[in-house]
Image (tube, rainbow, N blue to C red):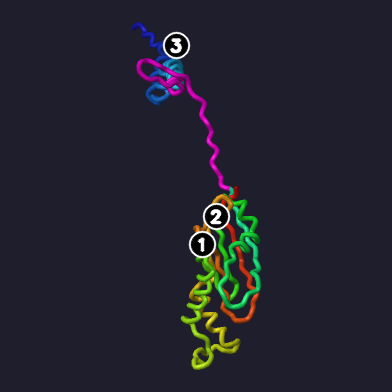
């Protein structure tokens, strides 16, 4: 009986190995087959997309080259704080217009474009206020009105207050200070106090004897 030749050719062997690899690694085969396509067409598509993004076209077929982007520098306000202690002229009981005195002791106001001036009285028997700056009779009437509202501890009213160790005018001075207030805040605009036409800064002294008062001035705002 003749013997059959079962020898497999090298080409068949390579083909079988190739089929075996495809069965084990189908994704690798897919990548190898499509690699030339991606290499040729993907790069051209990417270039076209870049051109399309960089060129602006409007009907009818009018295209303009890309414009350089302008870099906007964010605006930063020159914020600043200033604080100092001012001394008011020695005064006895009464209401006094001190706008000029405050401004002269605070030349820093001129350096602020926009801001706030806060004035704080460091005493408990005096006060600060904003009020009439023209007729001095208004200040005299204010002092008289406060004296009527808050009486002194003397004469027929003796014993009106428990606190009397510092004189008959001391406790009324504390009450008046609480009624009027120890501070005022004034806006600053373009280097000037933005007060109204008839507004001024008042210092109200409530003790009968002369006293020297201290005021803490704080400025916050944007510099020129």
Q: Nearer the viewer, mark 1 or mark 3?
A: 1
Q: Does residue 43 appear anywhere in the picture?
A: yes
Task: Please tell me whether the stretch drawn in magenta is mainly helix, strand or loop.
Answer: loop
Write down the residue under mark 2: 188
**Cα distance between the residues tagged 2 and 3:** 97 Å
Determine which of the numbered discs, if any, sits on residue 10 in the image.
3
Residue 75 image offset from top left, x and y in percent: 54, 42
What's the distance in space between the residues labelled 1 and 2, CA to CA? 14 Å
Of the image marks 1 and 3, the number of the one nearer the N terminus: 3
Q: Which residue is mark 1?
A: 199
Name the secondary structure under disc 3: helix
Q: What percent of the width, then of the height, locates residue 66?
A: 48, 22
Q: Residue at x 61, y 62 (%)?
A: 100
Mark 3 surroundings: few (<14), some (14-19) or many (≥20) residues within 10 A: few
Q: Residue furthest left?
A: 1
Q: With 109 as the anchor, is 139 left or right in this view? A: left
Magenta residue span:
51-77
Mark 2 lies on a secondary structure that is strand
65 within the magenta span:
yes
Residue 72 located left or right of residue 4: right
């Amino acid at each position: 009986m003749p013997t059959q030749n079962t020898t497999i050719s090298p080409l068949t062997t390579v083909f079988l190995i190739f089929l075996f690899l495809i069965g084990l690694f189908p994704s690798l085969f897919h990548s190898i087959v499509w690699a030339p396509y991606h290499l040729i067409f993907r790069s051209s598509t990417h270039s076209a997309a870049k051109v399309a993004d960089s060129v602006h076209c409007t009907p009818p077929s009018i295209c303009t080259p890309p414009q350089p982007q302008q870099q906007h520098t964010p605006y930063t306000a020159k914020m600043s704080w200033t604080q100092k202690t001012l001394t008011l002229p020695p005064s006895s009981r009464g209401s006094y217009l001190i706008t000029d005195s405050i401004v002269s002791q605070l030349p820093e106001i001129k350096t602020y474009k926009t801001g706030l001036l806060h004035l704080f009285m460091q005493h408990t028997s005096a006060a600060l206020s904003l009020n009439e700056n023209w007729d001095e009779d208004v200040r005299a009437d204010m002092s008289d009105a406060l004296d009527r509202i808050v009486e002194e501890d003397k004469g027929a009213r003796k014993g009106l207050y428990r606190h009397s160790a510092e004189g008959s005018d001391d406790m009324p001075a504390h009450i008046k200070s609480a009624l009027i207030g120890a501070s005022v805040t004034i806006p600053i605009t373009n280097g000037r106090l933005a007060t109204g036409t008839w507004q001024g800064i008042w210092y109200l002294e409530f003790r009968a004897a002369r006293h020297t008062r201290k005021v803490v001035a704080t400025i916050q705002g944007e510099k020129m």
